[in-house]
Every structure is written in structure tokens, then in C-alpha cells.
Image: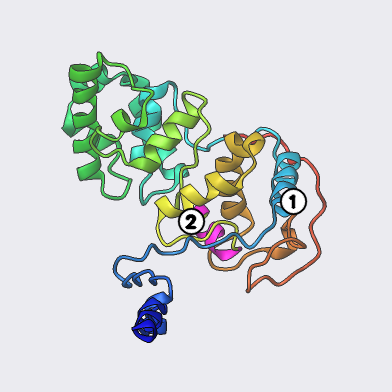
Amino acid sequence: MARQYREDMKEPKPKSVKLAALQPASKPRMSKATAKPRKPKSAYSTEEVEEIFRRFSVQRPEPKGELNYVNPFTLVVAVALSAQATDVGVNKATKALFAIADTPEKMLALGEDAVREHIRTIGLYRNKAKNVIALSRMLVEDFDGEVPRDRDELVKLPGVGRKTANVVLSMAFGQATIAVDTHIFRIANRIGLAPGKTPDQVEDHLVRVIPNHYLYHAHHWLILHGRYTCKARRPECEHCIIADLCKAAEKTNTIPAPLVALPPQVF
């Protein structure tokens, strides 16, 4: 009896537990469809980006857009017309147009046929003439003839996309925006400053990497650099003020051009 009691008092042996059960549960792997794509990184350090835009600021202290306009309305029209056209060509076409129709009310009174005749030297002029009349009508009917200062409102206008809206916000209303055109898209990817597969991605990336104190003029600095130096067919690296910093694979020169202020722009 005593022996039986001692046997009963012994601690029971623990049941065997599989080692896997003791390991913390692993997180389920995300499928390629649900995984968030990694944002591409700039090829430049914060200090290098600061130096790039410092040099741009010395070369062009007050950069300006090259489209002619007389008020926010004519700027909206000019930028909308500049799609797949040169600024020089748009300026030639709008000189006489803006002399007689510099408000949405006057543009509506002029009519689509007359607008079309004024801009017939510009690519896609028929569709652009329709958009000019349509956006003029919307400004009169929905905005009391005033160009809105809000991007979401601007992109409601016919023929006005995000790029056009950003240009208007910057040039007409002094807001720090980045309007990604073909020049900026090319440069951001070519030199690795702000890689992106779409203009929106490049815009978001540029806003994140450009120092705030340079952001207002950055749009024009990059456009002018792409238009006159970092050209599409053959970059003129020998004239580039950031040649030593540039990390483009196709660059042909590592010695920066002299850093001097250029003469004021004349249109």
C-alpha cells in the first residue's frame, strides 16, 4: 500500500511535444501580386543633391519658363497648347490670339473656329482648339472666370493634366511644384537623381530628394538643363556644370564647366 502511494505521488512524465510547435509562427509570405514594390533610390547622397542644386542656383539665379503669357488664364491656355509642341511654336501662335482674347469670356466670344485658325501651326490644333473653348466655358460657368489655385480643381479643366496644373500653380501662383515634362523625366532617370517609371513617380521622388529651399525653382532648372545641356540625343557633357557629380552611364566628361551666372533669359 505504501509502495502504491509513493508511485502515485511521483510527477507524471510530460508528454512529448514536437519542436516545431514550440517555434513562433512564421508570417505568411506575401505574393508578388500583393507585395509593395520598392521605391527606387536616388543615386546621390543628400550632400550631392544639395551641391547639384546650389550650382544650378548660381548658374541661373532666377530661372523662368519660356512660354509667353499675360495672366493665369493665358498661362493655362499656353501650357495646354504646349503638349507635343515647342514653346517657340506656341509663342508664335498665341501672340495674336492673346492680343484679342486674354480672358475666358473673350475666348468664348471668339469661338472655336477662330481659335483653330490662330493655332493651326501647332500639333493637334483641332482638338486643342476644342479644349481651349471648353476650358474657357468651364471657367466662366463654374469658377466665375477665375483660374483656380487648387490642383484638384485645375485638372478638372478640359485639356489640363497634372503637369499643366503644376506649371500654373508654380508660375502663376508661386507654389513650389514639380511639373514633370519630357526633359525632367529624362534627366531624373538618366542621371539617377529621381528614378521612376511614370511622371507621377518621378514627381514624387523629386519632391522627396530636392532640398526645400531649392524646390520652387527646381522645375525650371531641370527643364533648362535638359533643353540646353543634357539633351536627349547627345548630352553636351563638356558644357555641364555638374559633370563631376553626374552618375549617368553615358556621360562623356568628368570635368565640370565653369560655374558662372548666365545672362538673364530673353524671350
The answer to whether residue 138 of the structure is visible from this angle is yes
The magenta stretch is: 184-191
Determine crowd level at label 1: few under 14, some 14-19, many 20+ residues with C-alpha closer than 10 A. few
Determine crowd level at label 2: few under 14, some 14-19, many 20+ residues with C-alpha closer than 10 A. many
Could you tell me which quadrant the C terminus lies in? top right
Mark identifier at residue 47:
1
Q: What's the residue at 82%, 52% (across, down)?
A: 258
Type of the residue with mark 1: Glu
Type of the residue with mark 2: Phe
Q: Are marks 1 and 2 in contact (CB under 8 Å)?
A: no
Mark identifier at residue 185:
2
Point out residue 104 in the picture as x, y percentages from the top left corner: 27, 20
Instruction: Locate residue 245: give its quadrant.
Output: bottom right
Point out residue 236 in the picture as x, y percentages from the top left corner: 67, 63
- Mark 1: secondary structure: helix
Q: Is residue 213 above or below residue 34?
A: above
Q: Is residue 144 magenta?
A: no
Q: Is residue 224 above or below residue 240?
A: above
- Mark 2: secondary structure: helix
Q: What's the residue at 25%, 23% (across, down)?
A: 107
Could you tell me which quadrant the N terminus lies in? bottom left
The answer to whether residue 81 of the structure is visible from this angle is no
Q: Is residue 196 above or below residue 111?
A: below
